Amino acid sequence: MLSQKVSGTTVGMWLLIPEMQRLGVWDLLKGWTGGQNTDFDPRIALQLVNESALCINRVRKKNSLGHQGFQLANGMGRLVTDEQVHNLLNKHSIDQAEELLVNLGYQRQLCGHYKGGLIAVDPHRIISTSKRIMAKKKKRTDSPAQKMVQTFFSVCAQTGQPIMASIASTGMPTTKATKKLLSGTEKIIQNKALLLADKEHFTQDLLTTAKNHPMFDILTPALNTQRIQKQIQQLDYKPLWAGFAISETNYYFHGNKEVFRLIAERTGENKRDYEYKAFITTSDRGARELISDNYDERWSVENFFNFESSIGLNRASTLNLNIRYGKLAMSLMAQAATYQLRKRLNNQYKNWNASHLALEVLAWADGDIRVKDDTIIVTFYGAPNHINPKDYTGLPKILRNEGIDPCVPWLFGYKLDFRFK
């Protein structure tokens, strides 16, 4: 096909290839599948990564993509079927997917995707259309209970990038799932960090785990119970600025002598307008730093869900967990590659969410793909405003200067270069 030159509208997908080379995606997929450069299974997995980047559910139904260069970016001459994808995912275990996610985290750490010592943790629940009989859970207190898949994420609060993720069925308690999530997170982030949690994480078990953990402290809002409200309303507060004051005391769970640090905040100008809120922490950082500086960073995890959910974090047709884990790993690989691609876009385009990026950059860019000597040349027709041609023209030399082999192993050792006309 390449010898005849291919014209298509998905040439933007090829912009992800150098980012995958920088991330070592191919080696990760080979390790997960146990395949080699010439094997088929890593290419099936790579197609799943690229499908996630396109933010299209079941792209394999869209046969026209098989004639637009999409399949060639995966090192294949055609699209694989749903059955082939299912068979690949089904023969790999949850432990293998978790190991793949940890290895991806290592690579992201090396690429500078994580900074500082603040980590936001949060569950992300996805409504499921599974026909299985299963426990139901409320996604919000004002909504009916539904079948859903529970995913749990740890996210770097400074960069908003996911560190580790896990999946559980609906009935799994948040505390148990979060402890499992942290066991993977600590393998990637090997320095002391503060976990920024929400009220779901206000449990004696999780707080005790964090207090005794050598790497993690935790900061979480306390439940607004009568006992806690009575306790914090009797404290003496130190004003920090108009309408905001803080105080501290010790906190004990019923029937337990373990001491936790309680930080209370009071808002309001007049006594009749006062509102109180309590936080529990195992950190020894200053109260003002924790409440007014650190905790606001927790919303980075919500921004991540809102910004990136279209890569496959907003749908779950099955509750076969090893299938879901495999798809989650492929989605997070796609997210890592698109994050790096965003950093190379012109400023006004860097804040596009996942679906917007897929639509404007990856899915509908017109051009052609051909081979010249040992290099595959991708030509864009009409200079795109969002791309800096200097980042892609002469790509083999750019990669060599970064210490990366420019030969693309899943494209049978061909190099890749770009032209803009």
Image (cartoon, rainbow, N blue to C red):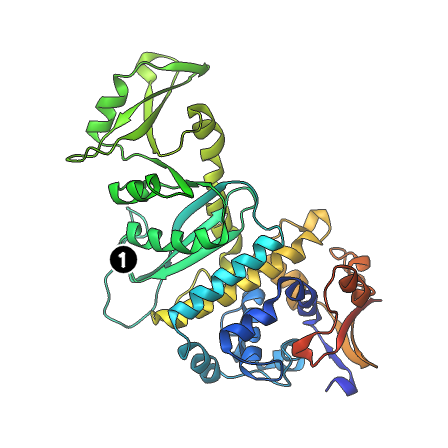
Q: Residue at the location (49% across, 57% down)?
A: 309
Is any atom of residue 317 visible in this view?
Answer: no
Q: Which image quarter: residue 400?
A: bottom right
Q: Which residue is mark 1?
A: 172
- Toward the left, the furthest residue is 255
Mark 1: amino acid:
Met
Q: Quadrant of the N terminus?
A: bottom right
Q: Which image quarter: residue 150?
A: bottom left
- Establish if 207 lies above or below 230: below
Is 26 placed left or right of 253 in the picture? right
Residue 110 vs residue 412, the one in the foreground: 110
Q: Quadrant of the C terminus?
A: bottom right
How many numbered marks have been drawn onto this rendered protein structure? 1
| Residue 220 horizontal/vertical position (percent) | 36, 37
| Residue 231 horizontal/vertical position (percent) | 23, 22
| Residue 39 horizontal/vertical position (percent) | 58, 84
Q: Which image quarter: residue 133?
A: bottom left
Residue 287 vs residue 130, the one in the foreground: 287
Is any atom of residue 82 visible in this view?
Answer: yes
Is 253 placed left or right of 124 in the picture? left
- Establish if 375 lies above or below 3: above
Q: Residue at the location (71% across, 67% down)?
A: 365
- Establish if 356 lies above or below 324: above
Is 189 placed left or right of 339 in the picture? left
